[in-house]
Image (cartoon, grey):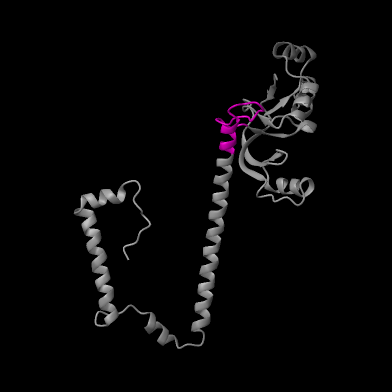
Amino acid sequence: MNLIICRRCDLAVPAEYIRVHMNGKHGIHCSNELINSIISNYQPSSVDVVTTFRNNTMELDSSVNGVPIKRGFRCLICLYCTPLPESMARHFRTQHKGQNIKEQMEENVPMQILFGGRLRKWFSVKEPGTMPINEGNDDAWIAVQALLAKQEKTMKKRIKEKEENVRLVRGFIVGTGWDIMVEGEDKKKLVAMAAIAKKSDPLGGIMELCQNYFEGISEKLRAGNVLLRRKIASEGFDHNRRWL
């Protein structure tokens, strides 16, 4: 399509709406000669062409110059787009009732709104490097693999967030258990139990021994055993091992 972009509102205007838009929305009077000259020189798309495009298109192959790009949400069921989370929640309540919005929604999707008024609609923008999946395309599986990899990444992120929540819950449980155990106990006795052991105490000697042990290892790694440092830093070394 050939589009004329209004620089005041960053929207494309069909040929028949140019004069009404400039005069009614921005108070700029345009003569018939000027409007006819613009249409003749630039041949912007008509309302019928724009309407057909709007109704049949969900994703733009590339962004339209002169129209801002925003990031938002896309429904994976019908490809409806919006930059507002509450609009997406309302969409699922009215159009996909019973569906899990977190599983059927994609976040941080680039999108543009090209037209205003009754033609208003958000279009997602195809990101560089993505591929359309067409029937009979020998390379379709490559696009499928890319899509699966993206979904796997999103799923891992959600699992990690759930694990973080579990850790917080465990910490809360441990803290609550401790509060229950020490309730009614003598505070001075508890302070004495939690105090750092003195050097004269048997536990103090064990703590000092452990401290010297790890300090010695650190010193050897820092200035001594180069081969050991290289081995630890090398690829394939199990960094999850513990000295104790």
The question of residue 141 being in magenta is answered with yes
Residue at the farthest left position:
224
> Where does residue 58 sit, x and y in percent of width and height?
71, 32
Q: Which residue is drawn at the image coordinates 66% and 45% (left, top)? A: 105
The one of 111 and 10 positioned closer to us in this rendering: 111
The relative height of residue 121 versus residue 216 in the rendered view (above or below) is above
Q: Main secondary structure of the magenta part?
A: loop
Q: Which residue is drawn at the image coordinates 67% and 46% (left, top)? A: 104
Picture quarter with the N terminus: top right
Q: Is 36 left, or right, of 110 in this rendering?
A: right
The question of residue 214 being in magenta is answered with no
Q: Determine which quarter of the picture holds residue 215.
A: bottom left
The relative height of residue 178 versus residue 20 in the rendered view (above or below) is below
The relative height of residue 189 versus residue 53 in the rendered view (above or below) is below
Q: Is residue 127 visible?
A: no
> Where does residue 124 sit, x and y in percent of width and height?
66, 34
Q: Is residue 210 visible?
A: yes
The relative height of residue 217 versus residue 14 in the rendered view (above or below) is below
Q: Which residue is drawn at the image coordinates 59% and 33% (left, top)? A: 141
> Where does residue 63 sit, x and y in percent of width and height?
62, 28
Magenta-highlighted residues:
126-147
Q: Which residue is drawn at the image coordinates 21% and 57% (left, top)? A: 220
> Where does residue 11 sit, x and y in percent of width and height?
70, 28
Query: What is the total number of numbered labels drawn onto the structure image?
Result: 0
The one of 146 and 201 positioned closer to us in this rendering: 146
The one of 181 and 83 positioned closer to us in this rendering: 181
Q: Is 200 left, or right, of 83 in this rendering?
A: left
